[in-house]
Image (spheres, helix red, strand yellow):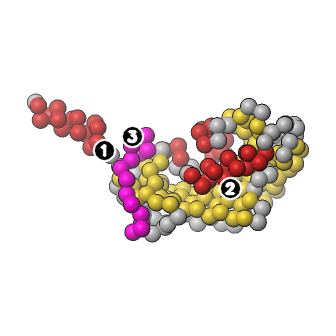
């Protein structure tokens, strides 16, 4: 009986722990360390984030433990620029040895959404690929607007967790309003870049 209790305890506390490769800016698993994921992070991931800010392009790849909600590819286009996140997840030990998904070049899809430039939210941005929704993300007096994929709207926790913003979405052309807000536009752009570099 005592041995059964010990076995059950092991199974409940660590028997099902997942091990994943963990590294930044390397697609070679041989250069990655490996970590044991905690109970919330139940997937291994290989991911790529491409961001365009003016003439600057940031291309990041990583391998890590993630929560299931993070196993979602998404993209947004804003007045700051655009960000693409592509991810491949799996749930076996060290299964994220595959390369991060390669993204196709952005192509306009004909849809437009309002975006904010400084305090002026009457600017517009061309949506790319499968960015079929317009979004507005709020946090106090700060507002971020632009185009987003369905996954951004279906998983608002992405914005709430990473940028501390509440997001609303709509599917019509230019449906996200042109209100003017007094906001720290550069702070919003910096926050977005910081999220990309840290996560």
Disc 3 crowd, CA 10 A, few/some/many (<14, 14-19, 20+): few
Note whether residue 154 is visible: no
How many numbered discs, if any?
3
Q: Position of residue 78 (x, y in %)?
A: 77, 51
Q: Which of 150 and 125 lies nearest the eye of the viewer?
A: 125
Q: What residue range appears in magenta?
A: 29-42
Residue plotted at (41% across, 63% down): 32
Upstream in the sequence, badge 1 or badge 2?
1
Upstream in the sequence, badge 2 or badge 3?
3
Badge number at residue 39: 3
Q: Position of residue 168 (x, y in %)?
A: 72, 36
- State the SS at label 1: loop
Q: Position of residue 149 (x, y in %)?
A: 68, 49
Q: Quadrant of residue 119?
A: top right
Left or right: 149, with 114 as reference point: left
Q: Which residue is mark 2?
A: 83
């Amino acid at each position: 009986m005592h041995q059964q209790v010990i076995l059950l305890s092991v199974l409940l506390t660590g028997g099902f722990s997942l091990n994943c490769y963990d590294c930044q800016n390397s697609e070679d698993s041989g250069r990655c360390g490996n970590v044991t994921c905690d109970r919330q992070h139940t997937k291994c991931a290989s991911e790529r984030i491409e961001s365009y800010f003016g003439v600057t392009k940031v291309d990041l790849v990583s391998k890590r433990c993630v929560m299931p909600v993070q196993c979602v590819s998404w993209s947004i286009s804003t007045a700051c620029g655009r960000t693409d996140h592509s991810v491949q997840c799996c749930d076996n030990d060290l299964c994220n040895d595959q390369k991060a998904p390669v993204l196709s070049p952005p192509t306009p899809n004909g849809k437009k959404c309002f975006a904010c430039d400084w305090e002026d939210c009457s600017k517009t941005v061309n949506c790319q690929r499968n960015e079929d929704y317009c979004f507005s993300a709020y946090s106090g007096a700060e507002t971020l607007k632009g185009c987003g994929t369905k996954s951004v709207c279906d998983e608002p926790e992405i914005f709430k967790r990473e940028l501390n913003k509440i997001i609303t979405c709509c599917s019509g052309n230019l449906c996200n309003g042109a209100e003017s807000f007094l906001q720290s536009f550069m702070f919003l752009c910096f926050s977005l870049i910081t999220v990309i570099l840290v996560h």
